[in-house]
Amino acid sequence: MVVNAAAAPLFALVARMGEDPACEDESLLERAQRGERRAFDQLYQRHVNAVYGRLTRLVGPSSELEDLVQRTFIELYRALPSFRGEAPLGAFIHGIAVRVGYDYLRKRARSRQSHWDEAAVLDLVAPGSSPEAAAHERQELKLAFGRLDRLKPKKRVAFVLH
């Protein structure tokens, strides 16, 4: 079959649509391990939302979430040379995010600082909710995170991961 030059990118896109995401991670990982910054940027884009979600569930709504996400990817970057691929990359990143979240919880428990940012709770409320539903959801979230804050960091991580 002969494909004209204008249609070639479309055929390449359709061919990639059936690819396994883990295979693409492997390819990006190999390139990132060789020092290709663009490959690491693409890994970041593929996994940043999952890391953000995991950390939000672990530490609650916090003004420091962005810093924790960045710390997770800094740790990933440092660990790339030693990553052997015995587990999927997503699981490896998940483990780093959990460790970063746990360290944050331990430090926060020692400093006895405010455990979560009430203003950040607003970001967790579903958009488009009625004012009454949004107020109820905010109250439920405050109650849930307040109860989580009473747990020791190790137990909190275990509870949230379960």
Image (cartoon, helix red, strand yellow):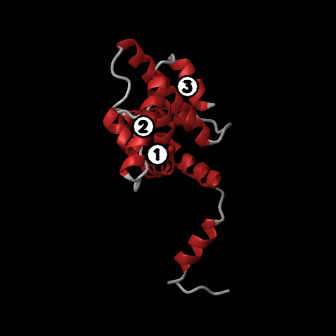
Asked which secondary structure carries label 3, the reply is helix
| Residue that mark 3 sits on | 157
Q: Is residue 13 left or right of residue 120?
A: right
Which is nearer the eye, 54 or 126? Answer: 126
Nearest the eye: 128 or 51? 128
> Marks 2 and 3, how far apart in space?
16 Å
**Earlier-in-chain disc, 2 versus 3:** 2
- Could you say where residue 149 lies in the image, as x and y percent from the top left? 45, 22
Q: Quadrant of residue 125?
A: top left
- Residue ID for mark 1: 48
Residue located 35% across and 42% down the image: 122
Taking the spot 33% from the left edge, 22% from the top edge, the residue there is: 114
Residue kind at label 1, given as amino acid type: Val
Residue type at mark 2? Val
Under tag 1, what secondary structure?
Answer: helix
Using a 10 Å C-alpha cutoff, classify the residue at mark 1 as few (fewer than 14 neighbours), some (14 to 19) or many (20 or more). some
Q: Residues within 10 Å of mark 3 (few under 14, many from 20)?
A: many
Are the residues at dot 2 and dot 1 in contact (C-beta closer than 8 Å)? yes
Above/below status of 3 relative to 80? below
Q: Is residue 134 visible?
A: yes
Task: Answer with mark 2 or mark 1, whichever residue precedes in sequence.
Answer: 1
Mark 2 element type: helix
The quadrant in which the N terminus is found is bottom right
Q: Mark number for residue 69?
A: 2
Question: In which quadrant of the rendered view does residue 120 lie?
Answer: top left
For this orientation, the residue located farthest to the top is: 110
Separation of residues labelled 2 and 1 (CA atoms): 7 Å
Could you tell which of marks 3 and 1 lies nearer the N-terminus? 1
